[in-house]
Amino acid sequence: MKYNAKILLFGEHTVIKGSRALAMPITNHFGSWQYAVDSMEKQTLQQKLPLLVQYLKEQSLDRVLDLVTFSKELHAGLYFKSSIPTGYGMGSSGALCAAIADRYQLELPKNNSKLKQLFGQMESFFHGTSSGMDPLVCYLNYPVLFSSNGDVDRVSLAKLEASKRGIDRAIFLLDTHIPRETAPYVNGFLERCKEGAYNNQCKEELVPLVNKAIQSAIIGNWEKLHESWERISHLQYDLFEFMIPNDFKQIWQKGLKGSAFKLKICGAGGGGFLLGICDDFKQVESVVPHSLIRII
């Protein structure tokens, strides 16, 4: 069983200001359960898993997870083999939490909002605090829409896929090859929001654009999505410039000045991936000298 990575397609930082957020699994990176062949290898590959089991017990999650069996299988050499890079916002710990819940579930919540809360409790072992969004997307293995009122709904992007049939349109990831941590960029955003004009621009301009882009993606309106994406790209360059790695500001501006592609932040920013949209993916591959991964 494979547990796919995930990306936040829309809602980075603006979800704090009341926008919706849209996350989706991607199959380019994933994790799965494996067994180590010897005790030395087991110690290396298991890393924090024994400590995680202890943490889950302390959180009284043995009510919903079979932690006895989990411990026994760890002793037998079980580990989580993953190609999901850390420090990229791709859900490396989320996929692990999803895999644990799937393999050792006793009685998981049926409601997605409550399941998200459980996953937040589990993933807090890695991050101190967690919303539970990443593990939920990895567990459901389906696009998920998070609303500002707390609603959590599975959605489909099939109409968006269908809207580009016969055309080389694409949403893609640009790899910066720069791992980063989430907290500094979230804190930087919150600090800037203390300034009234910045906060108002985020809430009154960026949040509505993000919501429009999400709606366009769900109904499969590529033209409206592209239009919103371009406006988001301009605003993010002004408001989130500190989140854009210096070496990639020129390529971001190249996208803004031309018509070939437009970039936006993916996740917390600061590194990891950038997200792009284009009408001709082959053209973008020929003009962007960086690793690109097509996801839609």
Image: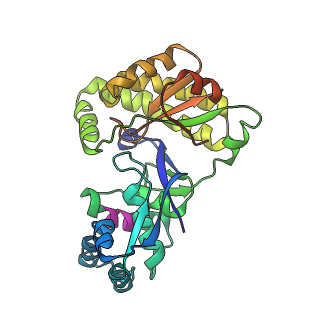
Image point 27% across, 74% down: which residue? Answer: 50
User: Can residue 215 be seen from the camera position used here?
Assistant: yes
> In which quadrant is the N terminus drawn?
bottom right
Q: Which residue is drawn at 26% across and 37% down?
A: 190
Mark count: 0
The region drawn magenta spans 117-123
Residue 174: give x, y in percent of width and height.
48, 34
Residue in view at x 51 percent, y 72 percent: 110
Above/below status of 91 relative to 118: above
Q: Is residue 121 above or below residue 232?
A: below
Relative placement, left or right, of 255 versus 38 is right
Please say whether residue 21 is visible from this viewpoint: no
x, y percentage for residue 148?
43, 48
Could you tell me which quadrant the C terminus lies in? top right
> Which image quarter: residue 199?
top left
Dominant SS type (magenta): helix
Q: Please identify the residue farthest to the right as the structure is shown.
A: 166
Query: In this rendering, would 22 be left or right of 187?
Result: right
